[in-house]
């Protein structure tokens, strides 16, 4: 799976950019603030969700014009070549078109997959559980395109239930339909997450790499997560009195956390050094890509923002070797070409500069 062309119009700092590439990894360099991350953020929108920054469509519009934005590209995969385009006008939600026909995020997820690692994720193991759930759900979504819809359905029903709880509504009839919806979508979320974690663990165990294996475990902040929709519905009913006192729902997949452990040392990831935490993250991203390649017959697009700057030369070379072995089109950013020296002719290059307040993308001379 790879892009052969990418066109941006009024997206972030890019007034207009036209990029032609092939299937090889792409080294992108330029000074800080030039627009490198904006470029790979555009590529991240070729998969379901809000992209690597989780920004709204309005936030992605170029300032000060705020005219709306458009992204289009040609995606090559096992199903052939497809023309994908994404637009937003007046701050409206992103509209997806595949081969010039409107498409849903679920359809997009069945066609295109992207996996990424950005500097903001470096604190994954030491920040709150919400960040780890987002990371977990992003991995899960790469395997199960309908996971996002299950999450939306669950969140919508839970918001309504929480509103009843805050208003101290005690009539069970008001809760029945909402809890049934939460049970169905919540059980689907939980099963998808468990399957994704198992697949990642399998992909790590089946490969020898220079990056350490991360043992993963799903835990609950309180109690345990019911395995079936029937059990979750019963648990919601039983917890209603406690939830009324708290003013919010205290049981369900929104209370799930992802525990990571440096397997070889049996040390929690949160207690590892900064370098070890980064290496564990890279290991998970590579395992995610490896598993998708095995399951789908093609690796996903990889987006690695400033990843080379935090690795020594040996680890950089190991990372580039693994990407090349996967055959993945990896879009990687850095401040200079020296960070990608170990790639040699296995990669193509783009340079991003700022000219009069607009990002300019070119190929090195």
Image (cartoon, helix red, strand yellow):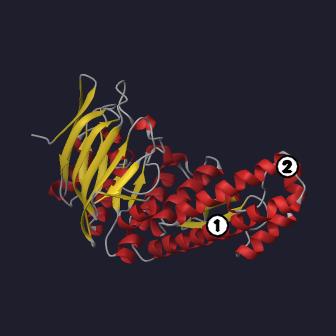
Q: Looking at the image, is 243 positioned above or below residue 224?
A: above
For the N terminus, give its image quadrant: bottom left
Residue for badge 1: 185
Marks counted in the figure total: 2
Compare residues 7 and 29 and report the one nearer the observer: 7
Looking at the image, tell me whether mark 1 or mark 2 is earlier in sequence order.
1
Mark 2 neighbour class, 10 Å CA radius: few under 14, some 14 to 19, many 20 or more: few
Q: Residue 174 vs residue 262: left or right?
A: right
Q: Are marks 1 and 2 in contact (CB under 8 Å)?
A: no
Q: Residue at x 46, y 69 (%)?
A: 143
Q: Which mark is residue 246?
A: 2
Q: Residue 144 vs residue 289: left or right?
A: right
Residue 134 coordinates in the image, percent (x, y): 56, 54
Compare residues 201 and 92 and report the one nearer the observer: 92
Residue 2 at least partly seen: yes
Compare residues 302 and 63 and report the one nearer the observer: 63
Residue 45 at least partly seen: no
Q: Residue at x 63, y 50 (%)?
A: 130
Judged by depth in the image, the label closer to the viewer, 1 or 2, is: 1
Q: Residue at x 23, y 36 (%)?
A: 16
Q: Which mark is residue 298?
A: none
Q: Report helix, strand or loop for mark 1.
A: helix
Instruction: Calculate the distance from the C-alpha at mark 1 to the C-alpha at mark 2.
Output: 23 Å
Residue 85 coordinates in the image, percent (x, y): 30, 51
Q: Residue at x 63, y 68 (%)?
A: 190
Q: Residue 236 vs residue 26: left or right?
A: right
Residue 290 coordinates in the image, percent (x, y): 38, 70
Compare residues 158 and 284 and report the one nearer the observer: 158
Mark 1 neighbour class, 10 Å CA radius: few under 14, some 14 to 19, many 20 or more: many
Q: In which quarter of the view is residue 226 placed?
A: bottom right
């Amino acid at each position: 799976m790879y892009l052969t062309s990418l066109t941006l119009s009024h997206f972030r700092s890019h007034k207009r950019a036209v990029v032609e590439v092939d299937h090889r990894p792409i080294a992108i360099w330029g000074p800080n603030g030039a627009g490198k991350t904006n470029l790979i953020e555009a590529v991240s929108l070729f998969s379901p969700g809000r992209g690597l920054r989780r920004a709204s469509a309005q936030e992605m519009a170029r300032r000060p014009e705020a005219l709306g934005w458009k992204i289009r590209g040609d995606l090559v995969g096992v199903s052939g070549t497809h023309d994908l385009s994404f637009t937003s006008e007046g701050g409206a939600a992103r509209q997806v078109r595949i081969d010039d026909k409107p498409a849903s995020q679920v359809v997009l997820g069945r066609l295109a997959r992207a996996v990424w690692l950005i500097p903001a994720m470096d604190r994954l193991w030491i920040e709150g559980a919400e960040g780890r759930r987002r990371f977990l759900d992003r991995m899960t979504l790469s395997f199960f395109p309908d996971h996002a819809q299950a999450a939306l359905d669950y969140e919508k029903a839970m918001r309504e239930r929480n509103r009843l709880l805050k208003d101290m509504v005690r009539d069970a009839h008001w809760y029945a339909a909402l809890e049934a919806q939460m049970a169905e979508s919540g059980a689907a979320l939980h099963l998808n997450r468990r399957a994704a974690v198992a697949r990642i663990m399998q992909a790590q165990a089946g490969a020898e790499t220079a990056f350490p294996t991360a043992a993963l475990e799903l835990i609950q902040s309180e109690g345990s997560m019911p395995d079936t929709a029937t059990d979750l519905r019963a648990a919601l009913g039983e917890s209603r009195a406690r939830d009324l006192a708290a003013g919010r729902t205290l049981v369900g997949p929104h209370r799930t956390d992802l525990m990571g452990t440096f397997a070889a040392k049996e040390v929690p990831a949160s207690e590892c050094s900064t370098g070890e935490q980064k290496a564990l993250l890279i290991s998970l991203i590579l395992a995610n890509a490896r598993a998708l390649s095995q399951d789908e017959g093609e690796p996903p697009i990889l987006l690695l923002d400033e990843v080379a700057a935090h690795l020594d030369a040996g680890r950089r070379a190991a990372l580039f070797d693994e990407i090349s072995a996967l055959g993945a089109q990896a879009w990687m950013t850095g401040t200079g070409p020296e960070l990608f020296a170990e790639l040699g002719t296995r990669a193509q290059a783009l340079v991003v500069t700022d000219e009069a307040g607009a990002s300019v993308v070119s190929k090195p001379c």
